[in-house]
Amino acid sequence: MTDRRPEPARVHFVTLGCPKNRVDSELMLGQLQDRAMTFTMDADEADVIVVNTCGFIEDAKKESIDVILEMARHRTEGNAKRLIVTGCLVQRYADALAEEIPEIDALLGNGEYGTVADVAASAVDELRAEGRLIQVADPTFIHQATNPRVNTFKPHSAYVKVSEGCDQKCTFCIIPALRGLQRSRPVEDIVREAEALAARGVVELNLIAQDLTGYGTDLDGKVRLADLCEALDPIDGLRWIRLHYAYPRPFPKRLLEVIGANKVLPYIDMPLQHISDPVLKRMQRGRPRKFVEKLLNDLFTNVDDLTLRSSFIVGFPGETDADFAELCAFVEATDFAHVGVFKFSREEGTPSYDLDDQIPQAVIDARHDHLMQLLKEKSHAKMATFLDRRIEVLVDGVSEETELLLAGRHAGQAPEIDGTTYINDGSARAGDLVEVEITETFDYDIVGHITRVIAEAPERPDHARLEAPSVAAPVTAGRRALRVIQS
């Protein structure tokens, strides 16, 4: 008699929110893969559905609820045998979700994603009988290089989360409540993870944290971001190291020297949120305009060819017309390469929820539209400076807009948020570093042709050479209307 083993469970995984959430999902996928589970892009085929939610602002919460309800339909009408919901929305509203959406079989908070494989492998009646429907506690978990991980991003690019949580007290932000206080990973552990990623063909590391410039302040000794960057730089195979979410703290001289040196790109993603002192004070950002201006001057003075990205909030409680005008003037006068704009979201559980002088939504919308139009014009002018230049570009693959183009990014374009360099003539593989001569520019993107290959991507079985046929007409079809996102 043949011993027939059950087929491995098929998992459909949905990730919402920021790159930090993506890393959490990749770690959960690694656990599931270690348990011999397989993955499917089709929810109709799944035995298990996992939704990793975002609960940062109102729009993100609504999107998460919509996706959960859509996946709940597969749980009740399709083949799915269990529905697991994880992430920030669960951390905030686990009891309400359990009550309002009974199709959910298990809710795992931000500190519990290390248990997702056990939950996925358990029978539904066991989950409920053992009281494991809801697992939410104060987040203390932080992953290690030895944890299995499935890279869901581009094969040649990856996000590396260097710390969890945040110690800042910004009045608009729920993150410390959702993810706990800052917990930095040891330098040696991050290096081991980066080495493993490089061995698999990753050439671009995107370092992320809620407060990247605060990295190491909670560790024993005097380990700081500069030490981490210097430790990552010698790793074979890596070409670009990018820095995201650098809270505006003092930048020591060593850090200024590291940025733009060797593999650490002259790229800083620094959310400033506002520039008017009264608004910064109500936000509890901790440092006034004078400090911000000196910090930016130090960066532009000490880092050659700096690309500076930032984000701002409009409509914060008490923001006057004069405060907003000051913000617009500051943004217009500062050499930002990329800027994202948030509309203030009044979130329960944050101090700003109870502040006086809440701004009417119509005023918030108008200020947002005004600033975005200003930024669009500023970006158009910035892109025009690339015309006729030859720049280094990391090839990402065939464009999502059309198979006639390849898509890539230069050092000043971070993945997913900063626009694209389109290639309309030449051949390359995803992960190749090529020289591109720019022939057209638009509001947020640029277009050109390959003049030479600088460095080829690491050999992998899935790497086929991609061809971009010569395009004589201007590249205008299928363009994205907006490439500035709120981050």
Image (cartoon, rainbow, N blue to C red):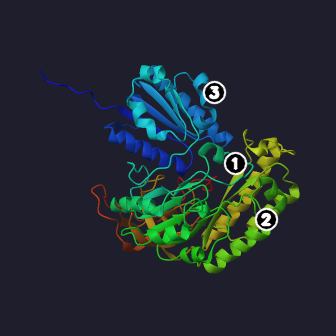
Are the residues at dot 1 and dot 3 in contact (C-beta closer than 8 Å)? no
Q: Which mark is residue 173?
A: 1
Answer with left or right where residue 326 lies relative to residue 221: right
Q: Is residue 292 left or right of residue 73?
A: right
432 to 302, vertically: above or below: above
From mark 2 to mark 3, how far is it between C-alphas?
39 Å
Residue picked out by circle 2 = 288
Amino acid bearing label 2 = Pro
Check the image and report above or below for 185 versus 105: below
For marks 1 and 2, give the CA distance: 18 Å
- From the image, which quarter does the N terminus lie in? top left
Mark 3 or mark 2, which is nearer the start of the sequence? Answer: 3
Name which of mark 1 and mark 2 comes first in the sequence.
1
Residue at the spot of label 3: 96
- SS under mark 3: helix
- Give the vertical position of 97 relative to 457 (above or below): above
The residue that appears at 38% across and 62% down in the rendered structure is 195
Q: Quadrant of residue 350?
A: top right
What's under tag 3, amino acid-wise?
A: Ala
Residue sitting farthest toward the left? 1
Q: Earlier in the sequence, mark 1 or mark 3?
A: 3
- Amino acid found under the numbered disc labelled 1: Cys
